[in-house]
Amino acid sequence: MTDTVSQTSTPQKRKLLDTLELDTRLLGMIGAFILVCIAFNVLTDGRFLTPRNIFNLTIQTVSVAIMATGMVFIIVTRHIDLSVGSLLATCSAIMAMTQTVVLPDWLGLGLGHWAIAPGAIIVGLIAGCLIGGFQGWLVGYLGIPAFIVTLGGLLVWRNVAWYLTNGQTIGPLDDSFVIFGGIGGTLGETWSWIFGIVALAFALFSQWQGRRSKITHDFPVKPLWAEALLAAIYAVAILGFIWLLNSYDIPENRLERMFEARGAVMPEGYTEGYGLPISVLLLIGIAIVMTLVARRTRLGRYIFATGGNPDAAELSGINTRLLTVKVFAIMGALCAVAGLVASARLSFHSNDIGTLDELRVIAAAVIGGTALSGGIGTIYGAILGALIMQSLQSGMAMVGVDAPFQNIVVGSVLVLAVLIDIIYRKRTGAK
Amino acid sequence: MATEVRRDGTPLVEMRDISVAFGGVKAVDHVSVDLYPGEVVGLLGHNGAGKSTLIKCLSGAYQADGGEIYVNGEKATINNPRDARRYNIETIYQTLALADNLDAASNLFLGRELTTPMGFVNDAAMEAETRKIMGRLNPNFKNFTTPVASLSGGQRQSVAIARAVYFNAKILIMDEPTAALGPQETKMVAELIDELKRQGLGIFLIDHDIHQVKALCDRASVMKNGQLVGTVHVDEVTEDDLLGMIILGKQPEKAA
């Protein structure tokens, strides 16, 4: 995504952006996202930017966004993973069978036991990690191109999932498992505010820490007003997001049922917002961890170095084969997490879960600025990419665009986004 | 060269009888070379003579099919670049081997990052160290935060040299370090080589430029078609002698 602001801006504006040390690519993507939202909001007479739709948009994005963060690492190391949708299905099938058959029947825990949901999730994560790592081993140690390994995986894991479940829909899933799906598990208004305030405090703390670290090493720092402006932007963004999610009220009859379940009567005129979905919380956590890995760990440094110049990485003593295994194992584990979110959202495992997700995930990463030539990509970009894709898709559905046209538009946007990205990189002189 | 190299002790590096074959082609055929502390040994030969292949056995990029390597008189096993680094062998590759998408500090410390007590990479400390060593090597170097892809050839070379020098190398391998440089930067590299020599490092210098070899090296080993033509003291031979060795594979009349 290019940056519409800086392309047309005066030198002064550009200077402002430099002072703030903001990533112009990020601004461009946010700009594009806002444009998409406003356009759909106008076309739908204001139905697109309602708390309800934004809530739905976020929970629909989570599964693809989680996998897109892992796809960034894969593409940065100059590989590709076409099997993520199928791997999601296999992990989902394994978790579904573990919680409906293996743990309750075979191990005799019985349905509703507290250990069923954690057990199923752990088994799913291990399975995802092992399958991903195995594919990484085929790529890294045996030298089979990732395209072929994961193209095979696309067929293999889709049908392993089918075999495991005999093609049946498995459900209903465990109650504590389903809270990871979105609408079935939210923090509620109070806890959402608490989370928002803690998150803001954390953001401001790391901003302050970054400044302090620069001062101790005598590096130039931003002027104080710029820091203050950034802090204000953080505050508005984080608290505004929480406020939006809290404004989506739980429907009245559902609230009544919740009170009944507790054996109480709902007071007249009582309202409550959903607040932050637990799946979104999960995504935020994964985004933070993955960003930390990318920027602050040796593993991340080696991933980007290998993507930039595999020979140089090898000559610097980096074990690039093992690195490939690790990257694919991370991808596999994230497929399991995405499988957890996707099946929990439906509250059952279905045979076609995650179909075509590989394309959405790759598209999200690429729209988010991950270069297929390797070495370049950001976690936040991939998540924004997933959000833009999902907004386009559900926006067009709301406007009533015919299904074939929806996919035609999404496909064209993908190609256009990469074109704009290439032009942007040429203009800014970045590689 | 002003300082006299003492060659009566154990050599810093001794490569004995090294052979490397690619398929049926013998790229290096029973070659022996050695290197003493404070000495610069030039490796000369045409493209494809096998000098880069020979030296890559020492830097860990290739494994020799036959022969042995001794470091300080002890047999060394070098299977990969990490092993070579453990013997304080550092290499400046002809291709520079830089990750273009990373900045100077990340490249300098690649594979040997400084970390915080928490185990995260300490970018600020690495940048500070990079500023220090660059201040010494190339005071004109200013672009510490941009990816090295956007740097000039000379600046990229500085990063590669800084990486080799920073970690207290005892043995330095330079594969055509001045090939991509202008006259001023070439002079800078020459001065650096002299300084490192004084500090007692041993340097293998691969170069095409006979003048440069005459000026910088103490001895020169010439290779042709994978075989060693001979090793000579550069002061005792003429440039024509060296050319004769490179082109014809002919020993000079008064062999050293």
Image (cartoon, helix red, strand yellow):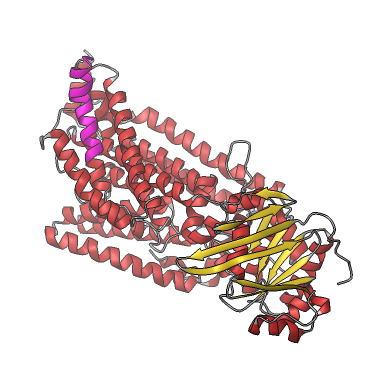
* Vertical placement of residue A40 versus A67, above or below: below
Residue A428 picture location, percent across and down: 49, 70
Asked if residue A354 can be seen in this view, the reply is no
Front position in the image: A9 or B38: B38
Residue A22 picture location, percent across and down: 52, 57
Front position in the image: A232 or A168: A168
* Vertical placement of residue A330 versus A183, above or below: below
Front position in the image: A387 or B222: B222
> At 71% across and 52% down in the image, what residue appears?
B71
Front position in the image: A378 or A317: A317
> At 47% across and 52% down in the image, what residue appears?
A320
Principal secondary structure, stretch drawn in magenta = helix
Quadrant containing the N terminus of chain A in the rendered view? bottom left
Q: Residue A86's image quarter?
A: top left
Q: Residue A389's image quarter?
A: bottom left
> How many numbered tags mark residues here?
0
* Vertical placement of residue B85 versus A281, above or below: below
Residue B2 picture location, percent across and down: 89, 70
Q: Residue A264's image quarter?
A: top left
Tell me the magenta residue range. A90-109
- Left-right relation of A367 to B92: left
Asked if residue B117 can be seen in this view, the reply is yes
- Residue B218 lies within the magenta run: no
> At 29% across and 43% down in the image, what residue appears?
A63
Residue B69 picture location, percent across and down: 66, 55
- Left-right relation of A7 to B181: left
Q: Residue furthest bottom?
A: B240
